[in-house]
Amino acid sequence: VELVESGGGLVQAGGSLRLSCAASGRTFSSSAMGWFRQAPGKEREFVAAISRSGGNTYYADSVKGRFTVSRDNAKNTVYLQMNSLKPEDTAVYYCAAKRTAFLLTVLTRLNEYDYWGQGTQVTVSS
């Protein structure tokens, strides 16, 4: 499974961005997906997760109410809509996939995922 993120960039505080993660292969619809981020000098942290069906989502407290994760299984793509961005959201954002997950499973830990994208930079200026 190859994951390719896009949609990052530079935005002012209060602005919005939508990240996309396109997956190769025929296992996307059976995969739980997640978004993580890593700021300079910090560990990679959980941001959001979505179940294979899209029927269950989970967010880190720091982004709850501002970010929305969604997926389109017909397009093999997962999205992260980011609104009301803050300078502390600045990081490289990564998507991750867990193959053959249970229907409503959402995963929040790095070691639970099998595949990772290369990341996309998000920079929020104050």
Image (cartoon, grey):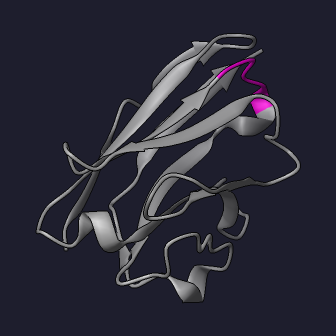
Relative to 35, does residue 77 appear above or below in the rendering?
A: above
Does the magenta run of residues contain 54? Answer: no
The number of callouts visible is 0
114 vs 76, nearest the viewer: 76
Relative to 103, does residue 113 appear above or below in the rendering?
A: below
**Residue lying farthest to the left in this orientation:** 25
Residue at 49 percent of width and 73 percent of height: 103
**Residue lying farthest to the bottom in this orientation:** 111
Relative to 126, does residue 98 appear above or below in the rendering?
A: below
Residue at 49 percent of width and 52 percent of height: 54
**What predominant SS class does the magenta segment belong to?**
loop
Find residue 27 and report its image quarter.
bottom left
Residue 35: % across, % down: 55, 56
Magenta highlight range: 83-87
Residue at 32 percent of width and 72 percent of height: 30
Residue 88 visible, this angle = yes
Screen quadrant of the N terminus: bottom left
Find residue 42 and report its image quarter.
bottom right
Residue 39: % across, % down: 66, 53
Q: Seen in the image, is 80 located left or right of residue 3?
A: right
